[in-house]
Image (cartoon, helix red, strand yellow):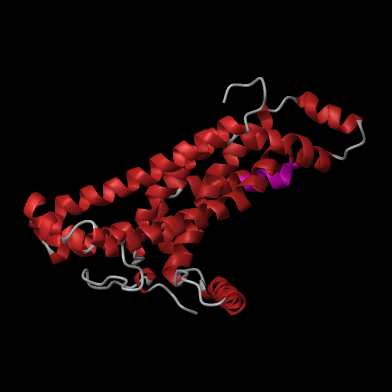
């Protein structure tokens, strides 16, 4: 399987770039031009742009996997809190309170240093190898222990918050919807699946926007366990040229802003597009 070198979780030198994926900016700007108009520190950032942008790829991948895990665990948890029995509801609530009340840094360090990550990592790597065999060589992240630990930590912490988003959306659906579904012969589970859940998912988009922003910014905590995401790579550049700290921070901040702004605008469109008729989005 061909892995993108810049996605490895171990630190590399700041001058390392991915020769296999040249950026189009090479044909527009030169390092000399940037140095002439913006100064040597911005030229240093420009010279290491691929190193930072591949860190952005890790940040995006980590955000997606964490939100997906959070949804897969958080939506059922929200359903249980809204419609579950006494024991299951109490268990989910207490577990959610524990996750929401524990700092994400503590959770991430625990998952990396205490949990047996290999039990989850081996099947994931086998699945990626299977995809590689079926689809041919594809550039995918080298899923290592740090990436998997960060995904588990961010994912389950996100699930604790997403469960509250979905619980509120489910309980916001009028009780008459459940009664109407039951009156035409649907079971309680069928009513939740076909009538309540679709409406709740539509109403949960605004809350999910906020959760996306939180998870995206919290990916920077993976710096603590050595994952080469955007903040970790920015820090690597600090030690290469300390006079360019401000420029590197500005560049990284712009990337975070573009990711947040573009995704929120996309979710605004989704919210308006799938809004329940007669309700404001």
Name the residue nearer the viewer: 26 or 214.
26
Q: Position of residue 132 (x, y in %)?
A: 56, 76
Name the residue nearer the viewer: 247 or 266.
266
- Left or right of 128 on screen, residue 233: left
User: Which segment is the magenta one?
Assistant: 84-92
The C terminus: image quadrant: top right
- Left or right of 240 on screen, residue 228: right
The kind of secondary structure the magenta stretch mainly shows is helix
Report the number of numbered marks: 0
Is 26 part of what is drawn in magenta? no
Choose top left, top right, bottom left or bottom right for residue 81.
top right
Q: Is residue 136 above or below residue 163?
A: below
Q: In the rendered image, is residue 186 in sight?
A: yes
Measuring 32% from the left and 59% from the top, which residue is drawn there?
A: 53
Q: Is residue 232 above or below residue 271?
A: below
Q: In the rendered image, is residue 244 in sight?
A: no
Measuring 51% from the left and 57% from the top, which residue is drawn there?
A: 65
Measuring 77% from the left and 39% from the top, which residue is drawn there?
A: 192
Q: Is residue 279 above or below residue 4?
A: above
Choose top left, top right, bottom left or bottom right for residue 89.
top right
Name, please, the residue furthest toward the front. Answer: 27
Name, please, the residue furthest toward the top. Answer: 278
Name the residue nearer the viewer: 176 or 157.
176
Q: Position of residue 145 (x, y in %)?
A: 45, 71
Q: Is residue 112 above or below residue 68?
A: below
- Left or right of 164 on screen, residue 85: right
Q: Position of residue 240 (x, y in %)?
A: 14, 66
- Left or right of 228 on screen, residue 197: right
């Amino acid at each position: 399987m061909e892995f993108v070198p810049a996605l490895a979780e171990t630190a590399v030198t700041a001058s390392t770039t991915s020769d296999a994926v040249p950026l189009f900016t090479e044909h527009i700007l030169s390092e000399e031009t940037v140095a002439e108009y913006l100064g040597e520190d911005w030229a240093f950032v420009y010279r290491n742009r691929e190193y930072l942008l591949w860190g952005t790829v890790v940040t995006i991948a980590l955000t997606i996997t964490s939100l997906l895990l959070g949804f897969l665990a958080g939506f059922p948890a929200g359903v249980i809190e809204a419609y579950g029995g006494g024991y299951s509801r109490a268990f989910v609530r207490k577990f959610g309170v524990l996750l929401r009340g524990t700092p994400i840094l503590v959770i991430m360090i625990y998952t990396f240093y205490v949990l047996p990550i290999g039990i989850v990592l081996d099947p994931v790597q086998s699945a990626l190898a299977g995809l590689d065999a079926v689809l041919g060589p594809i550039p995918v992240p080298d899923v290592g222990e740090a990436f998997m630990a960060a995904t588990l930590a961010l994912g389950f912490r996100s699930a604790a918050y997403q469960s509250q988003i979905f619980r509120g959306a489910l309980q916001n659906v009028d009780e008459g919807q459940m009664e109407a579904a039951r009156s035409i012969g649907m079971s309680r589970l069928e009513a939740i699946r076909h009538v309540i859940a679709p409406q709740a998912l539509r109403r949960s988009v605004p809350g999910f926007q906020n959760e996306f922003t939180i998870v995206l910014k919290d990916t920077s905590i993976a710096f603590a366990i050595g994952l080469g995401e955007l903040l970790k790579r920015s820090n690597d550049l600090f030690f290469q040229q300390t006079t360019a700290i401000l420029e590197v921070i500005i560049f990284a901040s712009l990337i975070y802003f573009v990711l947040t702004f573009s995704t929120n605008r996309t979710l605004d469109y989704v919210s308006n597009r799938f809004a329940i008729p007669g309700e404001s989005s």
